Image (cartoon, rainbow, N blue to C red):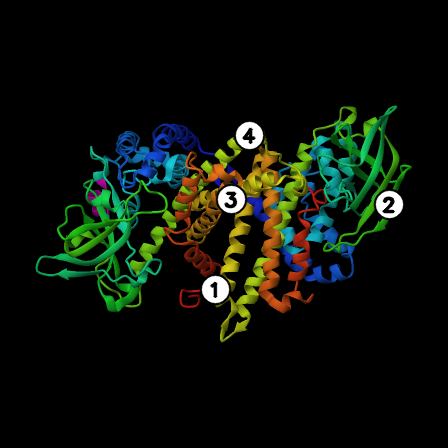
Amino acid sequence: MYSFEPSEEQKMLIDAINRYAVNDLRRKAHDADEEYGYPKEVLEKGWELGVLQASIPEAYGGFGEHSVLTGVLAAEEMAYGDFAATLAVLTPGLFALPILACGTEEQKQTYLPPIAEGEWLPYTAACIEPSFDFDLLEMRTTAQQQNGGYLLRGEKIYVPFAADAEQMIVYANLEGKTQGFIVHKDTPGLTVGDRQKTLGINALPIYKVTLQDVFVPAEQRLGGPQGHDPTPIFDSMHLAMAAMAIGVSRAAFEYSRDYAKEREVFGVKVAQKQAIAFMLAEMATEIEAIRLLTWEAAWMVDNHKENASKQAYLAHIGAMDMAMMVTDRAVQILGGHGYIREHPVELWMRNGRGFAMLTGLGMI
Amino acid sequence: MIEFEMPKPIAQQSYVLQTVAENMMRPVSRYFDEHEHEIPWDYINFMHMAMRATGAGSLAPPAEKKKEGEEEERKEKRPPIGYQMLAFMLEMLSWGDVGIYLCTPGGGLGAAAVEAAGTPEQKQKFLARFRDEKPVFAAMAMTEPHCGSDTSAIRTTAVLDKNTNEWVLNGEKIFVTAGQKSLEESNGFVVVWATIDPSAGRAGMRSFVVEAGTPGVKVTKLEHKMGIRASDTASIVLQDARVPFENILGSPEIQPDTSKGFKGAMATFDATRPLVAATGVGVARATLELVKELLAKQGIEIRYGLPRSKLTNIEREIIDMEVMLRSAWLLVIKAVWMADNRKPNPLEASMAKLRAGDVVTKITQRALELMGPIGYSRDYLLEKWFRDAKITDIYEGTGQINRLVVARNILGYSGRELR
């Protein structure tokens, strides 16, 4: 059957996240962007909504089952509040979800309970690299076999909370295949560099991480010495970006729509001009189209359908264009006011560009 | 629960219809494109026979009512999927050939209007004929030479002759899809939109069932078109055409300050727009599939999962097309799913239509560019699909009208507030 109606449980989760997004994130997003970070309480409040905890089974300290579709709904709703905050709240998932999906039983037993049962803690992952053609499938950071383990070499950027994280997953190219490695922060050869500044996600602390012959024992390879299929990780990364792009775009659409209904021009509201009304109609249509594409991909991943990975990739591709189009138009609809930082649309436009190149910064 | 599992009856139907598309439509696609106004009777007769046997795609009421208990039980078990079935059917047949699909007997828009606005007696009287031995067609006549999208400006009049209790219709209708087949090639009918009080504006708008053989009704012209050439697009003149009183759909009374009649017509669009979108999606899918096939023959396979900066231009184009096509199709499915579940869907119906209109024109246009001289050649159907696809953005409400509908919905504006 086809159905486009979230379950009762999902609706309750969406409602709870919506209140947080509107009351906490939206109100603080501007200052957090200017001041380069959220107060810890805000992240903890977001953590208490239990999005990640509900993805982890009871056996590992959580209280649910992992559903990418539920993750997509949750990520859209939180990003409707603020993109950077959503990435920050969900950062521990960058560490926990790959272990849940690909880890050995021992890795799950060791790492998941302290995350699922505890407060928000900066567990993280190092994925993105400093090259224009950064590619999940072909990383420049390498892993080489070395008696009883692997040597990691390379440079990672945009690693959230790296300065505070005790553990992180580092993705590296092992004989042509992307593999994850669980690395303790104090491992010799691993250096956390300066905090990085970017176009948009100022409120998320991100760092450069350098790996100079970092030795990782074989049992710390994700999935153990045999390694793992990285596909579920990539799917989750693509769909996290797609879902958050939808949330940010929806925020930008609604804000510019409401503004256009207030703003007077030539004796009418500016929304009564077809030039503006048609822009809004196209924005709404685009968002809905890409949302359905993302939902379908998430449903396919959850149900292990053939071509699920391709569909997740397509949803991400569609979402990055949609987000840029919608957020750009939101600024345009506000005109000069859109360019002023008092209105949130310029921040959303800066965020909007990020969905194309921040793959790996979010997982659901 | 959000779900994307194709229901079994739809999967079975698609399997059968693909065979029809491949064997009865594709082989004659080019012939009927080049022989405009010839009627594809082989396809029509086959479809009529098949639809009579299975009841698929038909809006005709069931011949005999099922026992009450049985029907209720069936309804409880499964949510309704009638419109979804129809959308998938139209998509697949249009994937075969949208021009030929438009010749499918069974009533089309005319029957849809009777189904949407008719009384049970009217449905019985007008729709039963689609189960006859011979194929029957029906059409909807709204557009006039001076007005297209602005349907409230219709000038065709219907005046009640109290002596004979008949409506007398006068006016000219154009762009009537299947008008000729409905009036001259079968025992069909045309649903004609007219005003019963020109001073009442939209409140005076009504539709009338005008049956084949009605004196004073004449097909005066068949258009020569860019695409969908197998489908007849007729001009119809009504000159003192008399129809029985009971052929009016909706109330014969004019209630001041209501535009119920007009709204009835517009409500029909909520059902038909996603279906028209589905036909466009079928054409675009045919195009995209052929392009990928031709590329594969030259050794070009599309790689997925890479950053855009690593993709070739051809890969980027194809991937963008896949995003456009699939997302448009999902909008269609959502809109018809809402119709099946009796959720009001004017917003979603127009979104599906405008998105489909946009993407199917873009996909067919870009596909031709990608295929270069091959795309332009009549050796392949690509250039035909380019012409066929364009109508998607025009009929059943242009892309611009649908933007207006979407905009009014999202802004909460009336037609007066957003003109």
> In the image, which disc is placed on residue A192?
2
Tell me the kind of residue under disc 1: Gln
How far apart in space, not on screen, are marks 2 and 3 (Cα)? 47 Å
> In the image, which disc is placed on residue B296?
4
Are the residues flagged by discs 2 and 1 from a single subunit? yes
Tell me the kind of residue under disc 2: Val
Are the residues flagged by discs 1 and 4 from a single subunit? no
Secondary structure of residue under mark 4:
helix
Are the residues flagged by discs 2 and 3 from a single subunit? no
Left or right of B153 on screen, residue B10: right
Q: B37 or B126, which lies in front?
A: B37
Q: Residues within 10 Å of mark 1 (few under 14, many from 20)?
A: some
Q: Are marks 2 and 1 in contact (CB under 8 Å)?
A: no
Q: Outermost residue, bottom direction?
A: A267
Magenta stretch bounds: B120-128
Q: Say which of marks 4 and 2 sits in front.
A: 4
Instruction: Output the chain of dot 1.
Output: A
Residue B41 in view of the camera: yes
Q: Which residue is mark 3?
A: B366
Q: Is B122 colored magenta in this rendering? A: yes
Labels 4 and 3: the sequence-earlier one: 4
Residue A64 in view of the camera: no
Secondary structure of residue under mark 1:
helix
> In the image, which disc is placed on residue A104?
none
Q: B190 or B412, which lies in front?
A: B190
Instruction: Output the chain of dot 3.
Output: B
Residue depicted at 68% across the width and 45% down the height: A50
| x then y, percent, for residue A140 | 78, 36
Q: Which residue is mark 1?
A: A274
Secondary structure of residue under mark 2:
strand
Tell me the kind of residue under disc 4: Ala
How far apart in space, not on screen, are marks 4 and 3 (Cα)? 18 Å
